[in-house]
Amino acid sequence: MADLPVHTIMFEILTRVPAKDVGRSKSVCKQWYALLSTQDFVRIHCSRSLVSSNQRVLLIDDLTCSVHLIIFKSNDYGPSSIVTFPFHHQNNDVSILSHLNGLLYVCLNHTYELLLWNPTTTAFKRLSTPDSHGFYINNLDDVGLYVDADDDYKVLHIKRRSSVLGVYLYSREVDSWRNIPFITRQEYLSLHFNWSAGTFCGGTLYFTVCECWLGGTNVVICFDVNSEQFKEISFSLVSSIGMVQGVLVNVKNELHMFASTGMFEMTIDLWTLQGDYWIKVLSCPPIPPISLSLWCDITHYVTNGNWFVMTKLGKLFTIEMDMKPFECFYPVTWFRGFKVRFVETIVSPSI
């Protein structure tokens, strides 16, 4: 270590300090400010921040937004801090559509505007433009956030408007939107299909597309972020009797799906994607009948060898797991909006 240049030693140390401390360290001197502002520093600091101790849960209610620590030993939330939105908003106005590497993709419901926001640094960027890009309509649109091979953060925005589908890409690097082609079955344009938010894993954005009625069609749409090509793969092999949900989560760069199906009683299976095919990992015994409102509110938490099926009323079911890949806290829910897990980073919503 004594033979290493001072600059290298500083870099190695500072890329390991918490994100909030990096922000404070920028005021130490001009040399530190320049170092901590480089893209290489931000990228490496982000990669070293993606650990369980840096995970937080952000909760939004009518009046407040709070960020909670996660206590892994008790599988619960820890102390919270109140977050002030740095942008103008109204009550029940802010929905979180997607998240990646500390950036949250936000919709302001009263104006339909889209923003990128880092709640750790408080920096944000409006993505709406005068030519109608960057506006989101709930139940019609879908989004995904990803980073490409050139370390450019991008947003994929799928619009369904009067049976006309448009697909648009926003690039943080060039700060602009552009249209890309989307070849798929026309039936997926129908409002009878629900699209999940995109889940980024292994260079691909994945979306579950589920038909709203019983026994309907369920597929997974894949978007290769480097070739910018779409393809369709099969859904996990779940029963077609009853309602179907597929919730995707990236676990250490492996895609998993919590597949729920049922009508009066619900069963939940955990699947992992190998190639283009789903392999069942384990099953949860049937959950006793619950109301439709709770059925749609279910959130899955996996941590420390336990899988918790939870709703706003608390834990519905707990199943023990012996799976080393699940060492972190993975809250995933079918509905987007008011609860999200994120990692504290210094990634900026703008260049």
Image (spheres, rainbow, N blue to C red):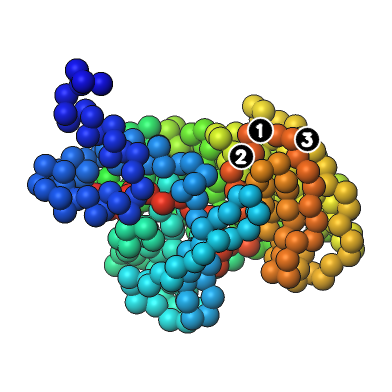
- Between the C-alphas of marks 3 and 1, the distance is 16 Å
**Residue 297 coordinates in the image, percent (x, y):** 70, 65
Residue nearest the observer in this picture, 195 or 47 = 47
Q: Is residue 34 left or right of residue 277?
A: left
Residue at 19% x, 50% y is 26
Residue 219 is tagged as none
Q: Residues within 10 Å of mark 1 (few under 14, many from 20)?
A: few
**Residue 254 coordinates in the image, percent (x, y):** 60, 34
Quarter-of-image position of residue 138: bottom right
Secondary structure beneath disc 2?
Answer: loop
Secondary structure beneath disc 3?
Answer: strand
- Between the C-alphas of marks 1 and 2, the distance is 6 Å
- Looking at the image, is mark 3 or mark 1 earlier in the sequence? 3
Determine whether label 1 and label 2 are within 8 Å by CB.
yes
Secondary structure beneath disc 1?
Answer: loop
Q: Is residue 98 left or right of residue 151?
A: right
- Looking at the image, is mark 3 or mark 2 earlier in the sequence? 3
- Between the C-alphas of marks 3 and 2, the distance is 19 Å
Quarter-of-image position of residue 70: bottom right
**Residue 35 coordinates in the image, percent (x, y):** 18, 40
* Residue to which mark 2 is pinned: 327
Residue at 59% x, 66% y is 139
**Residue 319 coordinates in the image, percent (x, y):** 80, 47
* Residue to which mark 1 is pinned: 324
Specify the amino acid type for callout 3.
Answer: Lys
* Residue to which mark 3 is pinned: 280
